Image (cartoon, rainbow, N blue to C red):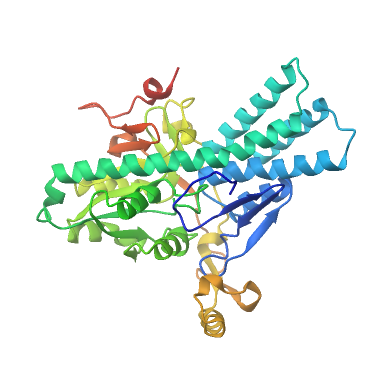
Amino acid sequence: MTKGASTNSKLQAIRWEHPRLLILNQLLLPHASEYVEIRNSEDGHRAIATMQVRGAPAIAIVAALSLAAEVLALCNNNDNSNNESVAELICSKLDYLGTSRPTAVDLFKAIASLKATVADALQKEEEVDIGQTYVDNAVAMLDRDVAANNRIGENGAEFIKTQSEKEDCSSNGGGEGVKVLTHCNTGALATAGHGTALGIIRSMYHKGIGNLEHVYFTETRPYNQGARLTSYELLTEGIPSTLVCDSAVSALLQSDPSIVAIVVGADRVAANGDTANKIGTYQLAITARHHGRLFIVAAPWTSIDLSLPSGKGIVIEKREENEITTITGFTQKSILAETSNSGSSSSGAAVDQLQMECIQVAPLGARAWNPSFDVTPASLISAIVTETGVFTKPDGAAEYDLQGAFGS
């Protein structure tokens, strides 16, 4: 992370060490920690498409910084480069990076913003270094994201505290702590630091807001971002937590009234509040409504797409069928052996000492439908938490008016 960015998270998924970009390879977590150098936009595109990095804010930042590393190398190696040619290269590479993943709006907002910055710089009368202007603006995204996440965390924590007090802790007797449930991974690994939905949980626990007692988190099939990444973050932070199967959430809510809220992130929020998020989010909203629990979306302004009046216009990424029909992971034997040899937790294991295998679960030839996201209707969402505040629907309304809140 760039100097000056302030986060309470113990994890650092994105490291900018001018002029180098390093990312934590999330395909290896939680059993091995390896930073991969991203040297150019091609490396950035590959890291995003293969999900070495994931999470809407982190995708946008890595895309921008991968090109920053490329621009710096180009300018250092070519004294004859001029502003016009550098600007043309930047815009072309940004378009290419936009093809990496289609659903998260943060990436496309970042691309539009960076293009506008380059265009404005070209119009200035005084001499401006276009390459350096681009790099400065790309690096600044890190600090802005951490600041936004910290505000989201506090806003969401205070909202849950207020709502749970109104409901007398959802009839759990009043004096006990509250519990929440989250889906996918929305913490420091999905952002520049702190996180969105997991940032709210982190703020509740570490700042003592809302008397948080326990966190449940889903496995989040088929990529298991919850089982692999959220568990890793919660264990690292020392936050009491329990993993549950995606299909067990309704039974859990039925059995435990002290779970006051389901808190999720967002990859794209339409102007009416319809929200695209990791597949499985929609069914969580349905069960939250049925059991009378809060369903809260946490998202920075960069994830809100006012150009879409509703979620019907959101493009949903479809991924390979084999992500469902097979399971890939490190063998338990190699993890235990490496942990025993190193005397430390498996997250610090050496990659070359671990054995990865792909297991065929479904019969060969079985077909699978594998959308990466679904769209939750605004009518099922209790609140949308942003860095600027908490938005709720007017009494009796089925949708939000985010255009009125954020639009010009």
Q: Nearer the viewer, residue 385 or 220?
A: 385
| Image spot of residue 223 (x, y percent) | 50, 59
Residue at the spot 53% in from the left edge and 44% down from the top edge: 5
Camera-side residue of 294 and 196: 196
- The x, y position of residue 191, in whole percent, is 50, 47
| Closer to us: 374 or 189 | 189
**Residue lying farthest to the right in this orientation:** 80
In the figure, is residue 35 to the left or right of 370? right
* Residue 85, quarter of picture: top right
As drawn, the residue found furthest toward the left would be 173
Residue name at image x 35 percent, y 47 percent: 200
Any part of residue 103 in sight? no
Q: Is residue 284 left or right of residue 85?
A: left
Residue 321 found in image quarter: bottom right
Q: Residue furthest front?
A: 4
Residue at image location 68% in from the left, 45% down from the top:
66
Q: How many marks?
A: 0
Residue at (55, 74) in percent of width and height: 330
Up-down relation of residue 355 to residue 130 (above or below): below
User: Is the residue 334 above or below the residue 129 in the image?
Assistant: below
Q: Residue furthest top?
A: 125
> Can I make out residue 68 in this image?
yes
Q: Quadrant of the C terminus?
A: top left
Left/right of residue 50 with respect to residue 39 in the rendered view:
left
User: In the picture, residue 108 is in which quadrant?
Assistant: top right
> Would you place residue 79 above or below residue 9 in this image?
above
- Rendered location of residue 236, percent (x, y): 43, 64
